[in-house]
Amino acid sequence: MARSKSDISNSAIRIFLQDVGTFYDQERGFDPFRPTVMQKDQLLEYFGCQCCFCNVEIDRKTLSQDHLIPMNKTHLGLHAWGNVVPCCQRCNNEKQQKPWQVFIEEKAHIDDVERRKSLINSFVGDMRYDPALSLHKYADSLYEDVGAVATTLINLRYKQAEEAIKLLMTSNL
Ligand SMILES: [Zn+2]
Protein backbone atom coordinates (compact mmCIF):
# COMPACT_ATOMS: atom_id res chain seq x y z
CA MET A 1 0.00 0.00 0.00
CA ALA A 2 2.94 2.33 0.65
CA ARG A 3 3.87 2.20 -3.01
CA SER A 4 0.43 3.17 -4.34
CA LYS A 5 0.11 5.91 -1.73
CA SER A 6 3.29 7.61 -2.94
CA ASP A 7 2.15 7.24 -6.58
CA ILE A 8 -1.03 9.12 -5.72
CA SER A 9 0.89 11.82 -3.86
CA ASN A 10 3.37 12.20 -6.73
CA SER A 11 0.51 12.61 -9.21
CA ALA A 12 -1.01 15.29 -6.99
CA ILE A 13 2.33 17.13 -6.90
CA ARG A 14 2.58 17.09 -10.70
CA ILE A 15 -0.96 18.46 -11.08
CA PHE A 16 -0.16 21.13 -8.48
CA LEU A 17 3.04 22.13 -10.34
CA GLN A 18 1.16 22.33 -13.65
CA ASP A 19 -1.59 24.48 -12.16
CA VAL A 20 0.81 26.79 -10.33
CA GLY A 21 2.83 26.98 -13.58
CA THR A 22 -0.26 28.14 -15.49
CA PHE A 23 -0.91 30.82 -12.88
CA TYR A 24 2.76 31.91 -12.86
CA ASP A 25 2.70 32.20 -16.68
CA GLN A 26 -0.43 34.34 -16.58
CA GLU A 27 1.02 36.56 -13.86
CA ARG A 28 4.05 37.17 -16.08
CA GLY A 29 1.81 37.99 -19.05
CA PHE A 30 2.37 34.76 -21.02
CA ASP A 31 -0.09 32.39 -22.61
CA PRO A 32 0.13 29.32 -20.37
CA PHE A 33 2.77 26.92 -21.59
CA ARG A 34 1.29 23.67 -23.01
CA PRO A 35 3.21 23.62 -25.47
CA THR A 36 1.19 24.43 -28.58
CA VAL A 37 2.78 24.22 -32.04
CA MET A 38 3.46 27.96 -31.88
CA GLN A 39 5.04 27.66 -28.44
CA LYS A 40 7.26 24.79 -29.65
CA ASP A 41 8.41 27.03 -32.51
CA GLN A 42 9.18 29.84 -30.05
CA LEU A 43 11.33 27.48 -27.96
CA LEU A 44 13.13 26.16 -31.04
CA GLU A 45 13.76 29.66 -32.33
CA TYR A 46 15.26 30.84 -29.05
CA PHE A 47 17.71 27.95 -29.03
CA GLY A 48 18.50 28.06 -32.76
CA CYS A 49 16.76 24.71 -33.43
CA GLN A 50 19.37 22.89 -31.36
CA CYS A 51 19.20 20.73 -28.27
CA CYS A 52 20.04 23.17 -25.47
CA PHE A 53 22.45 20.65 -23.92
CA CYS A 54 24.34 18.87 -26.74
CA ASN A 55 23.74 21.12 -29.80
CA VAL A 56 22.22 18.38 -31.95
CA GLU A 57 19.73 19.75 -34.51
CA ILE A 58 16.10 19.29 -33.50
CA ASP A 59 12.80 20.24 -35.07
CA ARG A 60 9.18 20.31 -34.01
CA LYS A 61 8.90 16.53 -34.47
CA THR A 62 12.09 15.51 -32.66
CA LEU A 63 11.78 18.16 -29.96
CA SER A 64 11.73 16.80 -26.44
CA GLN A 65 10.98 19.00 -23.43
CA ASP A 66 13.12 19.08 -20.34
CA HIS A 67 12.22 20.80 -17.09
CA LEU A 68 15.43 22.59 -16.00
CA ILE A 69 14.29 22.28 -12.40
CA PRO A 70 12.77 18.79 -12.29
CA MET A 71 9.03 18.62 -11.83
CA ASN A 72 8.88 16.46 -8.71
CA LYS A 73 8.39 16.74 -4.96
CA THR A 74 12.08 17.29 -4.24
CA HIS A 75 12.79 20.05 -6.77
CA LEU A 76 9.33 21.50 -7.46
CA GLY A 77 10.05 22.92 -10.91
CA LEU A 78 6.98 24.34 -12.64
CA HIS A 79 5.59 23.41 -16.02
CA ALA A 80 5.88 27.00 -17.19
CA TRP A 81 7.73 29.40 -19.44
CA GLY A 82 11.38 29.62 -18.45
CA ASN A 83 11.57 26.15 -16.91
CA VAL A 84 10.91 24.08 -20.03
CA VAL A 85 13.74 23.93 -22.57
CA PRO A 86 14.01 22.14 -25.92
CA CYS A 87 16.33 19.17 -26.06
CA CYS A 88 16.86 15.94 -27.97
CA GLN A 89 15.25 12.69 -26.82
CA ARG A 90 18.61 11.26 -25.83
CA CYS A 91 19.51 14.13 -23.49
CA ASN A 92 16.04 14.03 -22.00
CA ASN A 93 16.50 10.34 -21.17
CA GLU A 94 20.00 10.83 -19.81
CA LYS A 95 19.57 13.98 -17.71
CA GLN A 96 17.04 12.65 -15.18
CA GLN A 97 17.50 14.43 -11.82
CA LYS A 98 20.92 15.92 -12.55
CA PRO A 99 21.28 19.67 -12.17
CA TRP A 100 21.33 21.05 -15.73
CA GLN A 101 24.62 22.90 -15.07
CA VAL A 102 26.30 19.56 -14.33
CA PHE A 103 24.64 17.72 -17.20
CA ILE A 104 25.66 20.36 -19.74
CA GLU A 105 29.31 19.88 -18.80
CA GLU A 106 28.98 16.21 -19.72
CA LYS A 107 27.19 16.85 -22.99
CA ALA A 108 28.37 20.07 -24.60
CA HIS A 109 31.73 20.43 -26.30
CA ILE A 110 34.27 21.79 -23.81
CA ASP A 111 34.67 25.04 -25.78
CA ASP A 112 30.94 25.47 -25.86
CA VAL A 113 29.95 24.83 -22.23
CA GLU A 114 29.95 28.48 -21.11
CA ARG A 115 28.05 29.68 -24.19
CA ARG A 116 25.42 26.96 -23.65
CA LYS A 117 25.07 27.81 -19.98
CA SER A 118 24.69 31.52 -20.64
CA LEU A 119 22.08 30.87 -23.34
CA ILE A 120 20.00 28.89 -20.85
CA ASN A 121 20.51 31.52 -18.15
CA SER A 122 19.43 34.25 -20.60
CA PHE A 123 16.35 32.23 -21.44
CA VAL A 124 15.40 31.81 -17.77
CA GLY A 125 16.06 35.54 -17.20
CA ASP A 126 14.13 36.69 -20.29
CA MET A 127 11.16 34.62 -19.17
CA ARG A 128 11.51 36.03 -15.64
CA TYR A 129 11.36 32.57 -14.12
CA ASP A 130 12.68 32.77 -10.57
CA PRO A 131 14.68 29.60 -9.82
CA ALA A 132 14.56 30.49 -6.11
CA LEU A 133 10.76 30.36 -6.04
CA SER A 134 10.09 27.95 -3.20
CA LEU A 135 6.79 26.14 -2.85
CA HIS A 136 7.92 23.54 -0.33
CA LYS A 137 5.66 24.92 2.38
CA TYR A 138 2.59 24.07 0.28
CA ALA A 139 3.80 21.12 -1.75
CA ASP A 140 5.12 19.17 1.25
CA SER A 141 1.75 19.48 2.99
CA LEU A 142 -0.09 18.53 -0.19
CA TYR A 143 2.05 15.41 -0.53
CA GLU A 144 1.33 14.33 3.05
CA ASP A 145 -2.37 15.23 2.97
CA VAL A 146 -3.11 13.44 -0.29
CA GLY A 147 -1.30 10.36 0.98
CA ALA A 148 -3.20 10.37 4.29
CA VAL A 149 -6.61 10.92 2.68
CA ALA A 150 -5.97 8.24 0.06
CA THR A 151 -4.88 5.75 2.73
CA THR A 152 -7.98 6.47 4.83
CA LEU A 153 -10.30 6.01 1.84
CA ILE A 154 -8.53 2.88 0.63
CA ASN A 155 -8.72 1.34 4.13
CA LEU A 156 -12.41 2.22 4.45
CA ARG A 157 -13.35 0.64 1.12
CA TYR A 158 -11.02 -2.27 1.75
CA LYS A 159 -12.89 -3.13 4.97
CA GLN A 160 -16.20 -2.98 3.10
CA ALA A 161 -14.89 -5.21 0.32
CA GLU A 162 -13.55 -7.62 2.93
CA GLU A 163 -16.98 -7.82 4.61
CA ALA A 164 -18.74 -8.35 1.27
CA ILE A 165 -16.37 -11.15 0.30
CA LYS A 166 -16.75 -12.83 3.72
CA LEU A 167 -20.55 -12.67 3.40
CA LEU A 168 -20.42 -14.12 -0.10
CA MET A 169 -18.18 -16.98 1.06
CA THR A 170 -20.51 -17.75 3.99
CA SER A 171 -23.63 -17.79 1.83
CA ASN A 172 -21.94 -20.16 -0.59
CA LEU A 173 -21.24 -22.74 2.11
ZN1 LIG B 1 20.87 16.63 -26.73
Image (cartoon, rainbow, N blue to C red):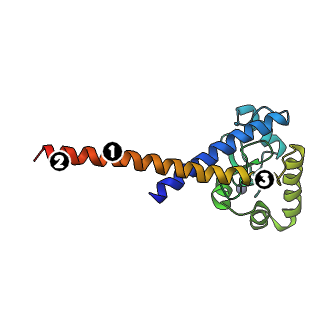
Left or right for 27, reference 170 = right
Give the number of the disc on residue 160: 1
**Residue under the point 83% across and 35% down:** 27
* Cα–Cα span, label 2 and label 3: 53 Å
Q: Quadrant of residue 110?
A: bottom right
Left or right for 148, reference 156 = right
Confirm or reject: label 3 Cβ below 8 Å from ligand 1: no
Give the number of the disc on residue 134: 3
- The spot of residue 59 in percent (x, y) is 71, 42
- The spot of residue 51 in percent (x, y) is 75, 52
Q: Quadrant of ligand 1?
A: bottom right
Is tag 3's residue or tag 1's residue first in the polypeptide sequence? 3
**Amino acid on which disc 3 is placed:** Ser
- The spot of residue 3 in percent (x, y) is 48, 58
Label 2 belongs to which residue? 169
**Amino acid on which disc 2 is placed:** Met
